Amino acid sequence: MEMFLSKVLPPNPTKKQRIIHKDLNALHKKYMEEKVEFSEYAMQNAMHQIAFYN
């Protein structure tokens, strides 16, 4: 289940994409430190990814 955006930014990312990328990395770190439940993490991750590509 390691399909996270947080690892890659496209070439020439927009300002919005940079912010989302930063938020995703923070979210991923919280999840790895077990401060966030998986369901919460998955939902936020999905919402970030939708925003990232729109």
Image (spheres, rainbow, N blue to C red):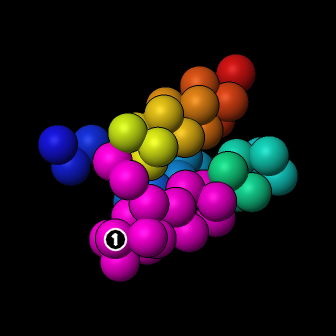
| Residue 9 image offset from top left, x and y in percent | 53, 53
Q: How many marks?
A: 1
As displayed, is residue 36 above or below residue 53?
A: below
Q: What residue appears at the point 33 percent right and 48 percent down from the top-left corner?
A: 38
Answer whether residue 53 is magenta in the image.
Answer: no
Where are the magenta residues, as a range? 21-38
| Furthest-right residue in this view | 15
Name the foreground residue: 37 vs 13.
Answer: 37
Q: What residue appears at the point 43 percent right and 70 percent down from the top-left corner?
A: 35
6 left or right of 11 in image:
left
Q: What residue appears at the point 38 percent right and 53 percent down from the top-left corner?
A: 37
Is residue 30 visible to us here?
yes
Answer whether residue 28 is magenta in the image.
Answer: yes
Name the foreground residue: 41 vs 4.
Answer: 41
Q: What residue appears at the point 21 percent right and 49 percent down from the top-left corner?
A: 2
- Mark 1 lies on residue: 34
**Position of the C terminus by quadrant:** top right
23 left or right of 3 in image:
right
Q: Callout 1: 10 Å neighbours few (<14), some, many (20+)?
A: few
Quarter of the view holding residue 52: top right
Name the foreground residue: 54 vs 13.
Answer: 54
| Furthest-left residue in this view | 1
